[in-house]
Image: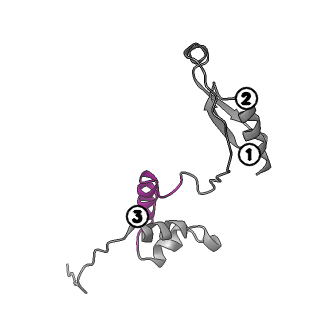
Amino acid sequence: MRVEILGQERRRRWRDDEKLAIVMSVGDAGATITEVAHRHEITRQQIYAWRSELKKKGLLSASSNALFIPLEMKTVQMDAADDERCPGIVELRLNCGRTLRFGSTFDTAALTELIRTVEAA
């Protein structure tokens, strides 16, 4: 068996902003993960690992389709007795296909405004 060493093996170091740019380029103009990986001479698995790493660091949202909607909310003061009667999380699935999760003590007026805002987006 014959082995040739063509050059010095290189180990590149990537900064977080470079990783983010590469991960975010997937899907641009229909680019697949395989195409992006080939363009940057990395493996597809590296892109998946970077995506996971960037999510853990908070540099990449859990959903690339995430949409942040400004909403002004008023806080409601509740006493301990109210909190004990209604513990838990409520999940609400809207007609637009989105899901809202909120505490069961969430103010109904604020919830109504939130639902209208999300459905209008």
Residue 86 placement: quadrant: top right
Residue 97 vs residue 69, the one in the foreground: 69
Instruction: Locate residue 80, reporting x and y percent.
Output: 55, 16
Q: Is residue 96 visible?
A: no
In percent of the image, x 41 and y 76: which residue is there? Answer: 41
Q: Amino acid at mark 2?
A: Thr
Mark 3 or 2: the one toward you: 2
In whole angstroms, how far apart are the C-alphas of marks 3 and 2?
45 Å
- What is the magenta range? 42-61
Q: Secondary structure at mark 2?
A: helix
Q: Which of marks 2 and 3 precedes in the sequence?
A: 3
Residue 61 vs residue 5, the one in the foreground: 61
Q: Amino acid at mark 1?
A: Val
Vertical placement of residue 58 versus 73, above or below:
below
**Number of the label disc, if any, that sits on residue 118:** 1
Instruction: Locate residue 84, reporting x and y percent.
Output: 56, 14
Prevalent SS, magenta region: helix
In whole angstroms, how far apart are the C-alphas of marks 3 and 1?
35 Å
Would residue 76 be found to the left or right of residue 14 on screen? Answer: right
The answer to whether the residues at label 3 and label 2 have Cβ atoms under 8 Å apart is: no
User: What residue does disc 2 label?
Assistant: 108
Q: Amino acid at mark 3?
A: Gln
User: What residue does disc 3 label?
Assistant: 46
Instruction: Locate residue 20, reporting x and y percent.
Output: 47, 66
Q: Quadrant of the image for the N terminus?
A: bottom left
Any magenta on residue 49?
A: yes
The answer to whether the residues at label 3 and label 1 have Cβ atoms under 8 Å apart is: no
In percent of the image, x 76 and y 45: which residue is there? Answer: 117
Q: For mark 2, does the 10 Å Cα neighbourhood hold few (<14), some (14 to 19), or many (20 or more) residues? A: few
Q: Which of marks 2 and 1 precedes in the sequence?
A: 2
